[in-house]
């Protein structure tokens, strides 16, 4: 076997110190197979070595949390014996190299994380970030990622119900593809990955193992450079047909009591699934690679252990149940093989062609993996109130904003996703949060993904808080009670103190907001080294939130529903223009402080709005976020095909900050006049800032002292940009 | 009315069809695995939407070679009703129970959205509860729904009033010839259509325009 040279160690992404530690743990030099196993298990992607010390700050518990971080996905109790299982995960690096397959396998991977726990996936979401539209790769990447997400999810028959998309030059060389999956299970039938007990058969099910994706986890833990396209062979190829069969076969097996533990083979494939199962179960695992179903001839042990071929699962069964399990997988025409056994040695032993090719203590791969307290530096938050031209017309700016890359309608994207399959989607893409009914009940799950990276760059702590607050607000705005989040922390190189400072700041902000809003983190994923040629992305800690509504018949949507409804704004409008979309798109400045998030105010305002919806009094609500108040109203008008007349209420700031400021903790509500007056009184009694600012009606948006703009003009600006861009008709200016 | 839903590997609207049938007939349909050779005693067979065999070959081509397909053909030949939705429509053309083919959407993209159609023909069990000329809205969700047939076949379909659903002008989502959304066989006991009637049987889910199709079947088939 090859001698391990410093060059080989380096190629495995391990530092000299790390290699020294491996020798110490083994009491000898590792062989190449062992080095490969260490390299993936100790990679940033699998070990969280740079973030683990800070992730501990996140609140993870609540009475309704059944399973927090550490398993394949988190689990919450949603009453009546039902559980919701969810997680979000990144597939950034592969999607940049090969957008269709990168995105598709990202979707497939997160689905497996959810159904390996016994859940049937019921909804998919995503958070996507692309470079500026004028960059020569952007159109190709958008097209490939969207069709990859659709190609996989549509074939699986699981609705993709929403998501978010931003464009910014910081993602030119490093796009972000974060996919979230939500599943449903019975709370008393959740499957975990702890391979407890010795002498139990370890079975392999699903697709055969090939040479694809070798070292994917290591690639995901390194920066990119111009030669990164050469890494195309490390991107896996997805097969949603096999995954659909695997889903049905696994759920069928899970209906029996034959399984002790089960885990999908995701990043680092057979290596991480076996090591993690043994680690959690406090057992050892012995694998015989000759038994592994193989797609290609003459695969080495190294290749098999590191392959990231998709659509595979590893399970530990109760002894004697193999035949029963095999019959199920044969029915679904999937491979099934007993490839090993659990032991009491707490060692991972791998045999190939009669020889032991790896033998190491499992704790060396997990507990003993390095944890780094990397030095970090908190930059002073950007502050100050930027200047703006007060003579610009609000109506003109509104039309322009609605047609900018970050604000334009995403219809071109979501119409490529089957969002109605499974016949439970009660709120389709385009609203504040998607809502899917819990099958055969009146309960609904509200789902959203959010983060404002520009705020996180200006002020990581407030930006982290804001991401959580906005997810919470979106769930509230449809009438659901926010229950828990999954986070997908996308950052640059953690070895740079200023990037590490962003990571720490964002995590601490997320932690504070999650605590204040009773919104624990139950699963998540870190994606670091999102840099190309030394340029890092904007800090992008995407938050996926899930909430519960008791009765889907009492739900709010953004569309105006009646002419003559009074329009109320809940929450105070102070006119915060720093880091706003308005400032960036109209004034061309990415300046000023991020809007501060007052969590007590968030909670008070949100609880008030949610009760109005849950009591069946209000059916029209929109949260105010990117673009500010007037963008929210324009979206409500376009969705309902009913216009509005808006007056500037009482003592307010100037028109531009009033209409375009991005102050937090605000909602727009529309309700019949008499009811609106009562709501106005109730809000004031509760000490909540409320303003009645207009009424719905007509087919224009009329703004007092500012002018009028027809809905058809707004709609044209809003709907046309993305299809025109994607058809290659227009290359917009960079942002 | 007794019904069966055929389940191919990677059918994925089988549950949606099952729910709609259960809701509207009050009875659970039989869920029949593609490997079976016999159908239970039923009045209606539904070929559901999905991606049978991944649709890696021509859509529906693999499914049309399944064991159960012979029994479905025999059922149709006996005059039994067969409803093919989306992938089911593709399978029906591959089985030659319906003429023509479904090609890739004209813009080459998967499309999911509600479409508006007119009911062109009410002389069938599937459409008798609609008014002739009525406009209805069902969602589509497909990548290969672009109906194609040679001129002679199109002429026959039109001449024999076998086009049951037609996309209204300007709302054709896939480039189908003559804006065709759904067609009957000669004996008018087999219907294939791309839009999903089974997804519009509940006001909460975007409408109830699909209900009349199932009511017509129940009325005709008992």
Image: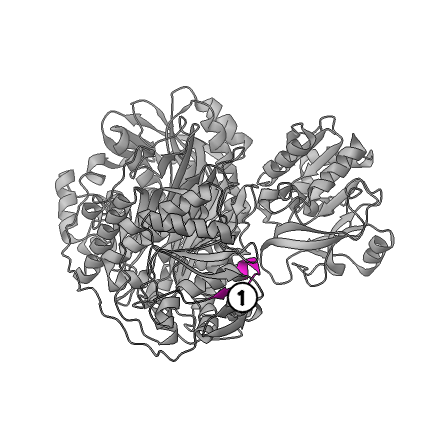
Within-10-Å neighbours for mark 1: few <14, some 14–19, many 20+:
some
Q: Quadrant of the N terminus of chain A?
A: top left
Q: Is residue A200 above or below residue A292?
A: above
Q: Residue tagged by mark 1?
A: A719
Q: Is residue A660 magenta?
A: no
Where does the image place residue A417, in percent across and percent down from the top left?
53, 52
Q: Nearer the viewer, residue B79 or B200?
A: B200
Query: Residue pushed farthest top?
Result: A320
Q: Is residue A292 visible?
A: no
Q: Quadrant of the C terminus of chain A?
A: bottom left
Q: Is residue A82 above or below residue A392?
A: above
Q: Nearer the viewer, residue A260 or A353?
A: A260
Q: Is residue A643 magenta?
A: yes
Image check: A657 left or right of B136? left
Looking at the rendered structure, the secondary structure element under dot 1 is: helix
Residue at the image point whose x is 82% and y is 55% from the top: B153
Image check: A618 left or right of B193? left
Where does the image place residue A442, in percent across and percent down from the top left?
51, 35
Residue range in magenta is A638-646
* Mark 1 belongs to chain: A
Image check: A473 left or right of A255? left
């Amino acid at each position: 076997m090859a001698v391990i040279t410093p060059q080989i160690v380096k190629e495995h992404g391990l530092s000299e110190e790390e290699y020294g530690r491996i020798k110490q743990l083994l009491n000898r030099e590792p062989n190449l197979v062992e080095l490969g196993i260490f390299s993936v298990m100790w990679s940033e992607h699998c070990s969280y070595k740079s973030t683990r010390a800070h992730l501990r700050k996140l609140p993870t518990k609540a009475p309704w949390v059944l399973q927090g971080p550490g398993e394949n996905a988190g689990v919450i109790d949603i009453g009546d014996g039902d559980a919701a299982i969810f997680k979000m995960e990144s597939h950034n690096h592969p999607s940049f190299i090969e957008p269709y397959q990168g995105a598709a396998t990202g979707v497939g991977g997160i689905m497996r994380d959810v159904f390996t726990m016994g859940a049937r996936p019921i909804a998919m979401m995503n958070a996507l970030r692309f470079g500026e539209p004028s960059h020569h790769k952007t159109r190709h990447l958008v097209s490939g990622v969207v069709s990859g997400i659709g190609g996989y999810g549509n074939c699986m028959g699981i609705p993709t119900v929403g998501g978010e998309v931003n464009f910014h030059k910081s993602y030119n060389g490093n796009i972000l593809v974060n996919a979230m999956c939500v599943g449903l299970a019975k709370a008393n039938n959740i499957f975990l990955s702890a391979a407890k007990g010795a002498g139990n058969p370890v079975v392999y099910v699903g697709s055969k193992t090939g040479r694809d994706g070798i070292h994917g986890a290591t690639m995901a833990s390194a920066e990119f450079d111009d030669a990164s396209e050469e890494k195309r062979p490390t991107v896996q190829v997805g097969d949603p047909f096999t995954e659909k069969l695997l889903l049905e076969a696994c759920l069928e097996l899970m209906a029996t009591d034959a399984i002790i533990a089960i885990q999908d083979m995701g990043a680092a494939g057979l290596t991480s699934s076996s090591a993690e199962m043994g680690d959690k179960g406090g057992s050892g695992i012995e694998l015989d690679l000759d038994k592994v179903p193989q797609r290609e001839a003459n695969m080495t042990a190294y290749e098999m252990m590191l392959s990231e071929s998709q659509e595979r699962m590893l399970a530990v069964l109760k002894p004697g149940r193999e035949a029963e399990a095999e019959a199920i997988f044969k029915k679904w025409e999937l491979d099934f093989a007993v490839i090993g056994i659990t032991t009491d040695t707490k060692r991972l032993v791998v045999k190939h062609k009669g020889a032991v090719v790896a033998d190491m203590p499992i704790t060396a791969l997990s507990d003993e993996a390095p944890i780094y307290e990397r030095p970090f530096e908190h930059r002073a938050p950007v502050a100050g109130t930027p200047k703006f031209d007060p003579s610009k017309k609000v109506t003109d700016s509104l039309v322009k904003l609605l047609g900018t890359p970050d604000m334009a309608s995403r219809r071109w994207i979501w119409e490529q996703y089957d969002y109605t399959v499974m016949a439970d989607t009660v709120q389709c893409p385009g609203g504040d949060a998607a809502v899917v009914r819990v099958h055969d009940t009146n309960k609904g799950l509200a789902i959203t993904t959010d983060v404002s990276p520009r705020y996180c760059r200006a002020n990581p702590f407030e930006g982290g808080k804001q991401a959580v607050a906005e997810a919470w607000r979106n769930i509230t705005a449809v009438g659901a009670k926010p229950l828990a989040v999954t986070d997908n922390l996308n950052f640059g190189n953690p070895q740079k103190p200023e990037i590490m400072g962003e990571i720490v700041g964002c995590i601490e902000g997320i932690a504070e907001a999650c605590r204040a809003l009773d919104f624990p983190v139950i699963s998540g994923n870190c994606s670091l080294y999102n840099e190309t040629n030394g340029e890092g992305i904007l800090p992008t800690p995407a938050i996926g939130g899930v909430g519960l509504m008791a009765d889907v018949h009492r739900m709010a949507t953004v569309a105006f529903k009646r002419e003559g409804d009074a329009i109320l704004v809940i929450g105070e409008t102070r006119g915060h223009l720093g880091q706003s979309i308005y400032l960036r798109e109209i004034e061309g400045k990415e300046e000023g402080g991020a809007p501060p998030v007052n969590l007590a105010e968030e909670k008070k305002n949100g609880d008030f709005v949610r009760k109005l919806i849950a009591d069946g009094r209000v059916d029209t609500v929109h949260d105010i976020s990117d673009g500010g108040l007037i963008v929210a109203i324009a979206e409500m008008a376009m969705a309902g095909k009913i216009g509005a007349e808006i007056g500037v209420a009482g003592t307010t700031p100037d028109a531009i900050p009033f209409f375009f400021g991005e102050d937090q903790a605000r909602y727009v509500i529309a309700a019949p006049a008499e009811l609106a007056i009562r709501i106005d009184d109730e809000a004031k009694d509760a000490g909540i800032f409320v303003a009645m600012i207009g009424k719905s009606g007509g087919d224009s948006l009329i703004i007092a002292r500012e002018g009028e703009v027809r809905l058809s003009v707004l709609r044209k600006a809003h709907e046309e940009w993305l299809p025109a861009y994607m058809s290659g008709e227009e290359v917009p200016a960079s942002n | 009315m007794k019904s069966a839903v055929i389940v191919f590997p990677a059918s994925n609207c089988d549950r949606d069809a099952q729910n709609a049938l259960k809701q509207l007939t009050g009875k659970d349909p039989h869920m029949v695995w593609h490997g079976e050779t016999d159908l239970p005693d039923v009045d209606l067979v539904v070929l559901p939407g999905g991606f049978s065999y991944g649709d890696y070959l021509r859509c529906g081509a693999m499914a049309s070679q399944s064991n159960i397909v012979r029994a479905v053909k025999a059922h149709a030949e006996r005059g039994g009703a067969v409803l093919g939705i989306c992938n089911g429509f593709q399978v029906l053309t591959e089985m030659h129970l319906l003429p023509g083919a479904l090609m890739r959407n004209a813009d080459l993209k998967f499309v999911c959205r509600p479409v508006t159609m007119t009911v062109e023909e009410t002389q069938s069990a599937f459409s008798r509860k609609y008014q002739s000329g009525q406009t209805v809205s069902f969602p589509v969700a497909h990548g290969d729904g672009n109906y194609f047939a040679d001129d002679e076949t199109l002429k026959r379909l039109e001449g024999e009033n076998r086009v049951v659903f037609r996309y209204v002008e300007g709302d054709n989502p896939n480039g189908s010839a003559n804006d065709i959304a759904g067609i009957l066989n000669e004996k008018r006991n087999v219907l294939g259509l791309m839009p999903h009637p089974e997804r519009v049987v509940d006001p909460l889910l975007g409408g109830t325009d699909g209900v009349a199709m199932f009511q017509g079947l129940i009325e005709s088939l008992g």
